Image: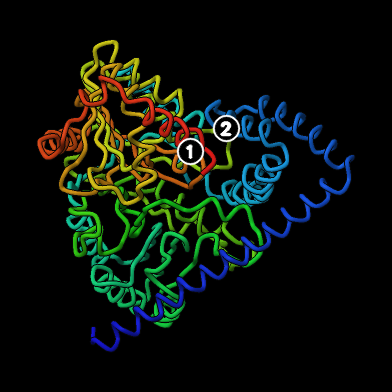
Amino acid sequence: MSKAKTVENKAAQRSDVAHIAAIGVSVLVQIMWIWSLFWQLQEKYVWVNMAVSLFALILVLAIYGRHQNAAIKMPWIILILVFPVLGVFFYLMVGWNPSIKRMKKRFEEIDARLRPYLPQNAAEQGALRARDRRAGGIAAYLAGTAGYPVYADTDVVYYDDAARGFAAQMEAIRGAKRFVFMEYHAIEDGESFRPMKELLMQKAAEGLDVRLFYDEIGSAGFINKSFIEQMEAGGVQCRVFNPLVPILNLFMNNRDHRKITVVDGQVGFTGGYNLADEYFNLTHPYGHWKDTGIRLEGAAVRTLTVLFLEMWNAIRGTDMDDTDFSRFFPAAHAPEGGEGFLQPYADNPMDGQATGEDVYMHVLNYAVDYAYFVTPYLIITDEMKKAFELAARRGVDVRLVTPGIPDKKMIYQMTRSYYAGLAMAGVRIYEYTPGFCHCKQCVADDSVAVCGTINLDYRSLYHHFENGAVLYGQKAVREMKADFDALFPQCREVTEQYRTGRNTVLRIRQCLLRLIAPLL
């Protein structure tokens, strides 16, 4: 790309950032205006103040009675009881989200048409349980509660480096014959994505159905409207998840954090990395970037196809949606050398199920010998923390890897606030010294592993649309274990540093950070 074109792209991206900033300011002004009106009314009229106090009490009781994690409820209860006016206002603006119900209805309508394309696979689930009863329990939870089947006829390739995974995606797309679907939280119109962009337009020119779906907040500063215009001019269909508007909209807090590529319904990719230069170490804003992913080939790609089509068709009722889904679900060929089982799944903030968190806790409960986790952010509920601690206390070698160089300093401090309690229970804590470790995965006992997009934080576990895959007895499980074994020597173990406790000032600061964490 020419220097002039590069400058033009950067200028357009800055303009897009300015546009998003303007929307943010507009929404903030609306919030401040509503708050000001609310405050003036309660100051001017005594009965308004009394009504607010009564409503605050009723609201606290309603929050307390909700079927929700206590770690999420308690900050709201404390805020509302200590500052009734501020607490009620803030909860109505952030904590209460009626737009979720409207979006949930839209998803249910799409899922009613898509879910029949997912097989029941009772025989596969029974075979897994017969082979490993504990693993069969995890599969039964995902199939029964979340509706995602387990598959036996799928090969999995693990990539310990995002660049290797991206190269494999390029190769798979070059061989595409029917369609290419891509859904990513962040896409950057930069050096890494440039050959992919050209390849996608080439495939569209060949007559393939090529679609690109991304999150507007995740891609802010990376791409702009001209990017969409260029892609669509090249035949690539583009949609943006939950675009920002200058009108107060509480659903804008829920983002699409998924990473999915589907080629012809036969090959699929997922993992932790987005499609931006820093993920492939072409830029180094936070030192060396460590990320991972997996390639799926076989029947399990059907689930990834369903997940993509669900988001593509459900995000806006005004879009021209698919009327015939059957063409996206060809008979999958059974790959040679496949072993074990695989269960792709998704999580969303609308179903009342913390599926991502539950799967991680299932892995901790499964472990007998070891359970290794890596996450860029560690902001967990009491239940999740207890699962880590109980596993360690029953003799499991439990280890957690977090970044040594943070991308968000306040979140980094929140992450470290959990170290002491975990370390004192026997969990070993490591920080990745070369830079930022963005992987989201775990492995236990050489038998079960999870790889996907789900961080160990409130946003991933409770607010975002996410996806992952559980691997049972796959060769890739052992490869993930080997990657962890290679990762630990690159880390600084801080277990003893935090096992001995913290000074009072640090404890107070970290407690305050953890108190507000569920509200962010």
* Image spot of residue 28 (x, y percent): 62, 60
Indicate whether 206 appears above or below 99. Answer: below
Choose between 232 and 399: the one closer to the eye. Answer: 399
Q: Is 46 placed above or below 394 here?
A: below
Q: Secondary structure at mark 1?
A: helix
| Residues at circles 1 and 2 in contact by the CB criterion of under 8 Å | yes
Please give the label number shown on residue 517: 1
Q: Secondary structure at mark 2?
A: helix
Q: Residue furthest top?
A: 394
Outermost bottom residue: 4
Position of 484 compared to 132: left or right?
Answer: left
Return the mark for residue 75. 2
The image quadrant that residue 236 belongs to is bottom left
Q: Residues within 10 Å of mark 1 (few under 14, many from 20)?
A: many
Assess disc 2: are there few (<14), some (14-19) or many (≥20) residues with their C-alpha within 10 Å of its C-alpha: some
Q: How is the image coloured?
A: rainbow
